[in-house]
């Protein structure tokens, strides 16, 4: 009698289960991709705000012109207006930003995604950006 070659039902079920587990892992990883990309764009925009702050200080001898209010960059400066608009777009249309500046220092922070978390990216005159759990509250630096 000849032996039939092939896979048993149990072998097929095990392979299908493994494929299902791997597919679930990939789907979870892919789902967070857009959020990470938006956070990277916010961080990049804030790095450019830091560059603009240096240019403002170089021109004026003061950082005071960086912000127009505690929740807005100085949109009278075209580059800052563009950066603020991009941060707002990355945050889903509602701007969540803090901006404080005086003659000697500045602090700017923006909310990172997800909107239910409590992570903010903060830049200040020290030049050391960092992730914080709250917005800036003064021009003296990141919390």
Image (spheres, rainbow, N blue to C red):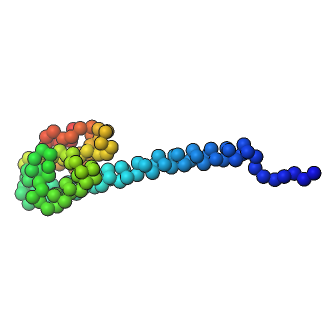
60 up-or-down from 20: above or below: below
Left or right of 106? Residue 5 is right
How many numbered discs? 0
Instruction: Please name whichever residue, 31 or 44, is drawn nearer the observer in this view of the structure.
Output: 31
Q: Check the picture and name the quadrant holding the C terminus.
A: top left
Residue 76 in the image: state x and y as whole percent. Answer: 9, 58
* Residue lying at the far right of the rendered structure: 1
Does residue 22 appear in the picture of this structure?
yes
Instruction: Please name whichever residue, 96 or 136, is drawn nearer the observer in this view of the structure.
Output: 96
Instruction: Please name whichever residue, 15 or 101, is drawn nearer the observer in this view of the structure.
Output: 15
The residue located at (12%, 44%) in the rendering is 70
Q: Quadrant of residue 122?
A: top left
Does residue 124 appear in the picture of this structure?
no
The residue located at (36%, 49%) in the rendering is 35
Q: Quadrant of residue 119?
A: top left
The residue located at (64%, 47%) in the rendering is 16
Left or right of 65? Residue 85 is right
Residue 105 in the image: state x and y as whole percent. Answer: 12, 47
* Residue lying at the far bottom of the rendered structure: 78
Residue 36 in the image: state x and y as whole percent. Answer: 36, 50
Left or right of 60? Residue 31 is right
14 up-or-down from 83: above or below: above
The residue located at (90%, 53%) in the rendering is 2
């Amino acid at each position: 009698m000849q032996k039939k070659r092939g896979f048993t039902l149990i072998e097929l079920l095990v392979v299908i289960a493994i494929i299902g587990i791997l597919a679930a892992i990939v789907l979870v990883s892919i789902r967070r991709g857009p959020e990470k990309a938006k956070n990277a764009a916010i961080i990049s925009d804030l790095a450019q705000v830091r560059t603009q702050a240096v240019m403002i200080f170089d021109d004026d001898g003061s950082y005071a012109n960086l912000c127009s209010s505690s929740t807005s960059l100085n949109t009278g400066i075209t580059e800052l207006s563009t950066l603020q608009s991009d941060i707002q777009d990355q945050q889903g249309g509602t701007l969540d930003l803090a901006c404080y500046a005086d003659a000697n220092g500045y602090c700017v922070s923006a909310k990172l995604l997800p909107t239910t978390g409590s992570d903010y990216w903060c830049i200040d005159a020290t030049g050391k950006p960092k992730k914080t759990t709250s917005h800036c509250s003064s021009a003296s630096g990141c919390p």
